[in-house]
Amino acid sequence: MTLLAAITAALEGFSATAKAFPLWLAWKLTKDCEQLTERIIQYEKAGNPADRSAADRLRSSLTYRRKLHAALLAGYAGNPVRDSDPDKDGHL
């Protein structure tokens, strides 16, 4: 393999990795949202003011992650999330 062929192969590999990164990040954000939702439910079950305050902070973090998730997926053609706003859907 020539040096030029090796460099070309390396660049193609980096390109494929860069294309897959947004999908991996969206998957990770999905898992984070699920974990945050579970923690919010646990805090809400406790019912004391300190836990409700913690749940409110987690809710704002969850909203940010949902917006980021929607933005990541909006770049892919044919995605129904493209024109939706997570805040309008009535999520937490």
Image: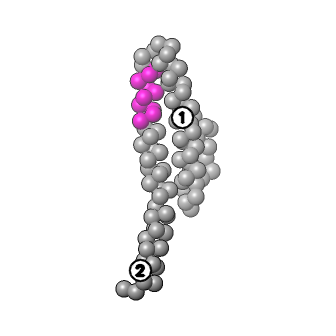
Query: Which residue is denoted by mark 1 in the rendering?
Result: 61
Per the model, the C-alpha gap separating discs 1 and 2 is 44 Å
Query: Which residue is denoted by mark 2 in the rendering?
Result: 6
Q: Residue at x 57, y 39 (%)?
A: 64
Q: Quadrant of the N terminus?
A: bottom left
Based on the displayed image, in which of its 4 quarters is residue 41 positioned? top left
Magenta segment, principal secondary structure? helix
The answer, for residue 78, to whether it is visible in the render is no
Residue type pointed to by label 2: Ala
Q: Residue at x 42, y 77 (%)?
A: 9
Q: Residue at x 53, y 30 (%)?
A: 59
* Disc 1: CA contacts within 10 A as few (<14), some (14-19) or many (>=20): few
The x, y position of residue 5, in whole percent, is: 43, 83
The x, y position of residue 55, in whole percent, is: 50, 24
The x, y position of residue 85, in whole percent, is: 62, 43
Q: Residue furthest bottom?
A: 2
Q: Are marks 1 and 2 in contact (CB under 8 Å)?
A: no
Q: Tell me where the magenta segment starts and ends, as one range.
A: 35-44
Counting every numbered tag in the picture gives 2
The x, y position of residue 62, in whole percent, is: 52, 35
